[in-house]
Structure formats: structure tokens, C-alpha cells
Amino acid sequence: MTTAEVADLLQVAEITLRKWRLAGTGPRFVRCGANVRYQRPDLEEWIASRTVASTSEVLP
């Protein structure tokens, strides 16, 4: 999936995904030359890792 497709799916700005890539806090991605792509299983795993039970729970 492209950055635009993932941004739309997650309802975040593309710049947010770029910042997450730089910080290493976002979903895993694949670099294909100058292009960045995301694999759906990596996105699903990342989303699952962000699941919390309350607003006071701290993410790892």
C-alpha cells in the first residue's frame, strides 16, 4: 500500500506517517528504491499493538 492509501486508512496526514517512519514509531514499511510501501499484515500488527483498555494505559 502507498503512503497515501495508509494515511487514508488510518485517517492521518501523510506527513504524520513520514514523521513516524523517521522516529521508528509507525507501522513497518518496505523501501522500494525511492518509494515506500506498506504491507497489510504489518499494518494490522501495528494497529493491534496500539490497542488499549483505557485512556490512562501507556503504550509500550
Image: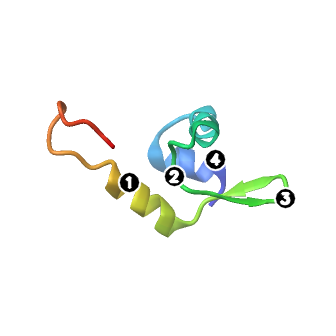
Q: What is the spatial separation of the Cα atoms under label 4 and label 1, in whole angstroms?
A: 17 Å
Q: What is the spatial separation of the Cα atoms under label 3 and label 4, in whole angstroms?
A: 17 Å
Callouts 4 and 1 close, C-beta under 8 Å: no
Judge by depth and name the residue closer to the eye, 27 or 6: 27
Q: Which residue is mark 3?
A: 33
- In the rendering, which numbered label is found on residue 4? 4
- State the residue at coordinates (33%, 57%): 48
Q: What is the spatial separation of the Cα atoms under label 1 and label 3, in whole angstroms?
A: 26 Å
Disc 3: CA contacts within 10 A as few (<14), some (14-19) or many (>=20)? few
Q: Which residue is mark 2?
A: 27
Earlier along the polypeptide chain: callout 3 or callout 4?
4
- State the residue at coordinates (15%, 38%): 54
For the view shown, which residue lies furthest in the front direction? 60
Judge by depth and name the residue closer to the eye, 41 or 2: 41
Q: Which residue is mark 1?
A: 47
What kind of element bears circle 1? helix
Earlier along the polypeptide chain: callout 4 or callout 2?
4
Residue 15 place in picture, x, y as percent: 63, 32
Q: What is the spatial separation of the Cα atoms under label 2 and label 1, in whole angstroms?
A: 8 Å
Disc 2: CA contacts within 10 A as few (<14), some (14-19) or many (>=20)? many
Which amino acid, mark 1? Ile
Residue 9 place in picture, x, y as percent: 48, 50
Earlier along the polypeptide chain: callout 2 or callout 1?
2
Which amino acid, mark 3? Gly
Q: What is the spatial separation of the Cα atoms under label 4 and label 2, in whole angstroms?
A: 14 Å
Callouts 2 and 1 close, C-beta under 8 Å: yes
Which amino acid, mark 2? Pro
Disc 1: CA contacts within 10 A as few (<14), some (14-19) or many (>=20)? few
